[in-house]
Image (spheres, rainbow, N blue to C red):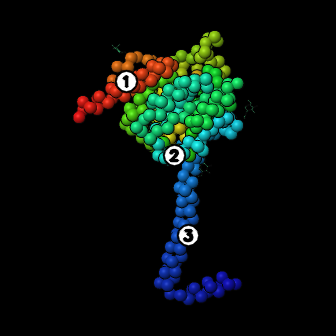
């Protein structure tokens, strides 16, 4: 009734007045919808990292329906798996929302000395806004030492998973999942083994030149051809059931992989859809292929140890530094060399 009266009175209005009212209503509707749309946007910004995962999940959903139509083949635990998780403590005294490089070091739980040497060299003493986090597995009977180390440095992520070769792939998988849930943003992320010697400034240099924040890309030493190993006595044996093909698609060798946050977020989702094999780097390569992440070879990431001279000339990452004395020595030499190069330049 009320409406009907309104309507009748409205019909008496001049056309021009009607038009004005219509315009006013439209503007009002626009205003209200905009208000409602802006609210969640603001909230999102305040929450900062509504976790990369959620955002990437959206990207993933729209870009890769093909894969999502399948059911996830893995179901990774994400709560009980982390025995030690410093995510809340990582950024004390540190502006973590603007890191340049975050180093994720896959480390064997017993390599206390290796980790200490890394903290004293490339993992700690850099001129970058960087942070180093070690991801380790579990071994019975050494909890006291691991807890002591973790208390002291707050840079240990420990998985509730036996620390053995077959589980290395899970260190990377859970590192991805961990990264996609923490409140740290970093322009670049470098996954690296604890036996490596790294030149952080040059890693950052390569990263800024080859990786855009919008890219889906992993950079490192690209292995073009590698055979699936069917010899059961081999460490790298993979069964026909787990992987039916006789070769792996190209992949970046696992000891040293450089990437960005966007790619990490994408990988963290995509790992759920590719059956795990125990060859860590081949697996990450397969996952990367499944979501069209590009792989770029860069010769500065060494697959084998050479000498320091060739490292200083061409390298940013080299394996073969299990000996912590040699790591410390080469780090000092590298610093001296870089310093003298700078001096001769000016
Ligand atoms: C670690 O995992 C085992 C099973 O694999 C479980 O029994 C144990 O409770 C877990 N430990 C913690 C602290 O979550
Ligand atoms: C990240 O930040 C949000 C909001 O500030 C907070 O609720 C959440 O607990 C934080 N997560 C971690 C892992 O620190
Ligand atoms: C793998 O192939 C790419 C492109 O064909 C090439 O640029 C790269 O150098 C190769 N990598 C190695 C390690 O040979
Ligand atoms: C994969 O990415 C490349 C660019 O890197 C693009 O040209 C191509 O269309 C993409 N393919 C799919 C299936 O999304
Ligand atoms: C270092 O290694 C490079 C290449 O591997 C080689 O050409 C060079 O002769 C070596 N230098 C020394 C001092 O051993």
Q: Quadrant of the C terminus?
A: top left
**Location of residue 149 (image quadrant):** top right
Q: Where does residue 243 sit, x and y in percent of width and height?
A: 62, 22
Q: Where does residue 238 sit, x and y in percent of width and height?
A: 62, 18
Residue linked to disc 3 = 32
Label 3 with label 1: CB-CB less than 8 Å: no
SS under mark 2 = loop
Residue linked to disc 2 = 93
Q: Is residue 343 left or right of residue 185?
A: left
Q: Name the residue: 49% across, 38% down.
A: 131
Q: Upstream in the sequence, badge 3 or badge 1? A: 3
SS under mark 1 = helix
Q: CA distance from mark 3 to mark 2?
A: 42 Å
Q: Nearer the viewer, mark 3 or mark 2?
A: 2
Q: Upstream in the sequence, badge 3 or badge 2? A: 3
Q: Please tell me whether residue 8 is drawn above or below residue 168 in the rendered image.
A: below
Viewer-proximal residue among 329 and 44? 329
Q: CA distance from mark 3 to mark 1?
A: 64 Å
SS under mark 3 = helix
Q: Where does residue 31 sit, x and y in percent of width and height?
A: 52, 70
Q: Nearer the viewer, mark 3 or mark 1?
A: 1
Residue linked to disc 1 = 333
Q: Is residue 85 left or right of residue 193?
A: right
* Residue 173 visible in this rendered orientation of the protein: no
């Amino acid at each position: 009734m009320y409406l009907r009266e309104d309507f009748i009175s409205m019909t008496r209005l001049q056309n021009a007045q009607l038009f004005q009212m219509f315009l006013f209503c439209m503007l009002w509707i626009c205003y209200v919808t905009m208000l409602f749309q802006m609210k969640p946007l603001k909230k999102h910004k305040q929450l900062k990292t509504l976790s990369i995962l959620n955002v990437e999940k959206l990207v993933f959903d729209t870009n890769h329906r093909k894969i999502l139509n399948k059911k996830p083949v893995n179901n990774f635990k994400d709560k009980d798996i982390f025995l030690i998780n410093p995510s809340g403590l990582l950024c004390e005294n540190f502006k973590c929302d603007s890191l340049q490089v975050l180093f994720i070091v896959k480390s064997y739980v017993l390599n206390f000395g290796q980790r200490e040497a890394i903290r004293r060299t490339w993992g700690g003493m850099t001129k970058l806004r960087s942070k180093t986090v070690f991801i380790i597995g579990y071994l019975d009977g050494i909890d006291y030492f691991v807890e002591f180390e973790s208390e002291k440095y707050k840079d240990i992520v420990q998985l509730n998973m036996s620390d053995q070769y077959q589980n290395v792939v899970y260190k990377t998988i859970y590192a991805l999942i961990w990264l996609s849930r923490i409140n740290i943003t970093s322009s670049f992320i470098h996954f690296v083994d604890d036996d490596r010697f790294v030149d952080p400034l040059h890693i950052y240099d390569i990263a800024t030149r080859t990786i855009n924040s919008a890219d889906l890309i992993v950079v490192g030493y690209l292995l073009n051809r590698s055979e699936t190993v069917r010899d059961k006595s081999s460490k790298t044996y993979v069964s026909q059931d787990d992987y039916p093909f006789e070769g792996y698609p190209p992949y970046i060798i696992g000891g040293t992989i450089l990437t960005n946050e966007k790619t990490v977020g994408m990988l963290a989702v995509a790992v759920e859809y590719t059956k795990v094999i125990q060859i860590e780097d081949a697996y990450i390569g397969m996952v990367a292929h499944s979501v069209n992440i590009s792989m770029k070879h860069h010769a500065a990431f060494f697959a084998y140890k050479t000498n320091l001279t060739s490292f200083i000339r061409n390298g940013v990452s080299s394996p073969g530094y299990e000996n912590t004395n040699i790591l410390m020595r080469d780090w000092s030499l590298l610093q001296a060399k870089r310093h003298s190069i700078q001096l001769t330049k000016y």
